[in-house]
Amino acid sequence: MARNHRQPTTTEAYCDSCGGEQPREISIAILTENPAGENAAFSREPYRITECLGCGATTKTRMNDV
């Protein structure tokens, strides 16, 4: 389950899939990392989700690892 706390933001950045500068939609979501585990309620972490608006490639980056 993901919950977005903000409206997505659009910016231009290099896309590995497209091979050039493309507009990207960036949002923050809270994702459950281990939904089947006994402590699933405690395994939620914030992620930065980036989607290329040119080709649709999506990346998820755990914010605590940055």
Image (tube, rainbow, N blue to C red):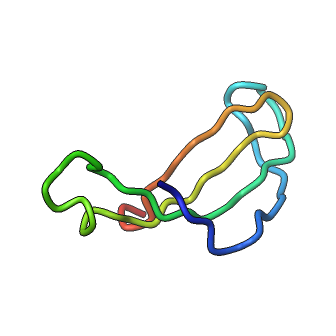
Q: Residue at x 84, y 59 (%)?
A: 10
Q: Position of residue 27 (x, y in %)?
A: 67, 61
Height in image: 5 above or below 25?
below
Instruction: Residue 44: give x, y in percent of width and height.
Output: 35, 64
Q: Is residue 22 above or below residue 10?
A: above
Q: Quadrant of residue 15?
A: top right
Judged left or right of residue 60, residue 42 is: left
Residue at the image point whose x is 17% and y is 50% from the top: 37
The image quadrant that residue 54 belongs to is: top right
Residue 65 position, x and y percent, is: 36, 61
The residue nearer to you, when weighing 54 against 32, is 32
Task: Pick the quarter of the image with the C terminus.
Answer: bottom left
- Residue 13: percent from left, percent from top: 77, 48
Which residue is located at x 66 percent, y 49 percent?
50
- Numbered circles on residues, count: 0
Farthest residue, direction left: 38
Left or right of residue 34, residue 2 in this image: right
- Classify 24 as above or below 21: below
Q: Nearer the viewer, residue 35 or 55?
A: 35
Relative to residue 19, is residue 26 depicted above or below?
A: below
